[in-house]
Image (cartoon, grey):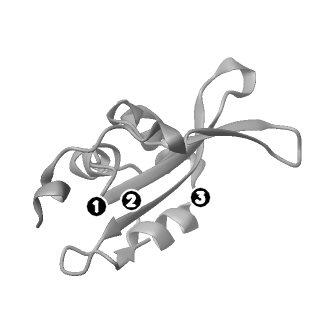
Amino acid sequence: MDTLSALPQAYPVQWIDRWNLANGQAVTVRPVLPQDAVLESAFVAHGLTASSRYQRFQAGLHQLPPAMLAYFTQIDYHQHFALVVESFKGGAQQQVADARFVRDAEDPLQAEF
């Protein structure tokens, strides 16, 4: 690993955006934060169908184990980058989607999405 990738990365504010969906709903797209553990946990437990959870995790889990939850929310924004999409419908914050990539340690030009 080179010296630059070993340094903690600053929060990438340039990736924060607000989108208006076709149905008129406004959502915010932004990089994940460690504080998003509660949102991420609720998204997996209640925002995904059982089939979606199985396809994503290849297991029949109903909630994220603590170690996996930390892995999903405590990222470096360089080797591991994740965006969340959240809405504030009815004044309550709710995660409605996420996307991420994790670079291959051997070949940083390749990543798992």
Q: Is residue 65 left or right of residue 88?
A: left
First in residue order: circle 2 vs circle 3: 3
Quadrant, the N terminus = bottom left
Q: Quadrant of residue 109?
A: bottom left
Say which amino acid is labelled 3.
Thr
Marks 1 and 2, Cα distance to the nearest angstrom? 26 Å
Say which amino acid is labelled 1.
Gln
First in residue order: circle 1 vs circle 2: 2
- Which SS class for mark 3? loop
- Which SS class for mark 1? loop
Q: Kindly identify which residue carries mark 1.
A: 79
Q: Kindly identify which residue carries mark 3.
A: 49
- Please tell me which residue is depicted at 28% across the width and 74% down the height of the picture: 108
Marks 2 and 3, Cα distance to the nearest angstrom? 11 Å
Q: Check residue 57 in the rendering and tell me which mark sits there, or answer none.
A: none
Q: Position of residue 14 (x, y in %)?
A: 51, 41
Q: Quadrant of residue 103?
A: bottom left
Q: Position of residue 70 (x, y in %)?
A: 26, 44
Q: Kindly identify which residue carries mark 2.
A: 61
Quadrant, the C terminus = bottom left
Q: Position of residue 25 (x, y in %)?
A: 81, 37
Q: Is residue 64 left or right of residue 25?
A: left
Marks 3 and 1, Cα distance to the nearest angstrom? 29 Å
What is the total number of numbered labels drawn onto the structure image? 3
- Please tell me which residue is depicted at 31% across the width and 38% down the height of the picture: 10
